[in-house]
Amino acid sequence: MPGEKKNGKIIIIGGGAVGMAVATSLTRHSDYSITVFSADVHTAYSQCGMPFVISGEIKDFKTLIRRDEKFLKGIGIDLHLGTRIDSINTKESTVVSGAEEYHYDKLVIATGSKTKIPSDIPGTRLGNVFTLRTLSDAIKIEEAVKNASSVVIIGGGSIGAELAAAIVRRNVNTTLLSRSSSILSHNVDPDMAEAVQEHLESMGVNVITGYVPSALNGEENVSSVTIGTTDFPADLVIFSTGVEPENELAINAGIDIGPTGGIIVDEYLHPSMSGAFHPDIYCGGECVEVLDHITGKPMLSQVASNARRMAGTITKNLTSKPVRFDPILNPWVAVIGNIQVGTTGITSKKAAENDIKIVTGLATGSTRAEYYPGGSKLFIKLIFSDEYLVGAQVVGGEGVKERIDALTLAIKKRTTVHELANIETCYAPPVSTLQDPTGFAAKGALKKMRKKA
């Protein structure tokens, strides 16, 4: 299981949230020799912060770099940026990059995800058509926005919505296009997404749902996007149409891939190879599939907090007694303009896909006492199955993360609708109302259950 060799060689493929967290932790807690290969030219930076530099809320992209190359090499990491690994030989315990071959005692695969651009849309290769994945992508988008008067963002997920809010704040005509009938369709139910869409529209974003673009038009650079029968001007187009695991390297090495496209791993994050889990290799981050706590089925996680937890699991398994990475609820929060939106557990859509019968409760409240200045509306949706909490969604101007964190723990602890209907909460006018809307949402669900009974 965990590595016991002193001065053994560890190679880490990927310099993102998992790869660099494992590397820096191992420098403090082990005697391993550590080499990191990353295809990116930057490392140890916050991807989540990139939209907020584009909006102007964060001064510059340098602020997002938490540890520079000089620091990382200074603590003993052999760091190779802008370097791709071409192949892995698990029998010989080697990796190849160009003409060089490197031996390892333990291997960590943390190759992350790659962006998906629909291949059937004409014009995607025109100039000023971007995706946002790396710091280099963000820098290019920032430069292009400076000279743009109109931007079309294709994809209504969390990154697309964050970018729309960021760019419209730059006084640029912004259109957000979602193929689903509501934005944030992977994260929240349509009734909760409605409040976020209304907020974006109040900021000046033109939100279009239920369409895919027919074409991107222009000669050298993009000039417009055809949506339905209308051509929308666009000096800049950003595709935010999702990501998929970057697993070609793992596939070629004979590592098993699951139905989600992610690497199959056991509870210790060892990858499966022909059905057997390899004891000297660990995998983590967006390239692996893990288990959903509610459905028990494989899923992908693209939240930084789970990546950091996987890095912790890998580090402990390399340096101490084995620890497990348990099934996840994947709690998520985003700040879109001046509104916060969060979710945990399953949505109504996911429940339907898995034949889980649910009862929901909705409540609207305020984040502060009515008479206290600065408050905002708060929308809470709770999802129950067999009287147990299995999902929660919160939208509001403040206090969303704290509620999602608490409700995540409530799901893990199998909290019932009765317990939440009688929830004990604290109160002070600057931070809450006398009775928290969470209790009202639970009471709404309980009332539905009693009617059915």
Image (spheres, helix red, strand yellow):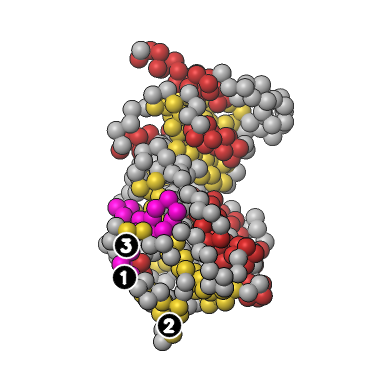
Q: Which residue is mark 2?
A: 101
Residue kind at label 2, given as amino acid type? Glu
Q: Percent from the top left, x then y, of residue 375?
A: 66, 32
- The type of residue carrying mark 1 is Asn
Q: Main secondary structure of the magenta part?
A: loop
Horizontal and vertical percent position of residue 419: 53, 21
Residue 191 visible in this rendered orientation of the protein: yes
Please determine whether, in this image, residue 55 is positioned above or below residue 326: below
Nearest to viewer (mark 1 / mark 3): 3
Q: Earlier in the sequence, mark 2 or mark 1?
A: 2
Query: In the image shown, does 20 or 326 lie closer to the viewer?
Result: 326
**Tag 2, which secondary structure?**
strand
The magenta stretch spans residue 256: yes
- Residue at mark 1: 252
What SS does tag 3 mark? strand
Tell me the residue at 47%/65% (across/down). Answer: 108
Vertical relation: 260 (above or below) 441: below
Mark 3 or mark 2: name the one nearer the start of the chain.
2
Q: Which residues are magenta?
A: 251-273
Foreground pick, 138 / 446: 446
Question: Mark 1: which secondary structure?
Answer: helix
Residue type indicated by callout 3? Met
The answer to which of 450 and 229 lies nearer the viewer is: 450
Q: Classify 10 Å Cα crowding around label 3: few (below 14), some (14-19), many (20 and above).
A: some
Residue 288, quarter of the rendered image: bottom left
Q: Which residue is mark 3?
A: 273
Asked if the residue under mark 2 is in contact with the one under mark 3, i.e. CB atoms within 8 Å, the reply is no
What residue is drawn where x is 56% and y is 18%? 422
Residue at image x 33%, y 53%? 260
Residue at the image point whose x is 63% and y is 31% from the top? 367
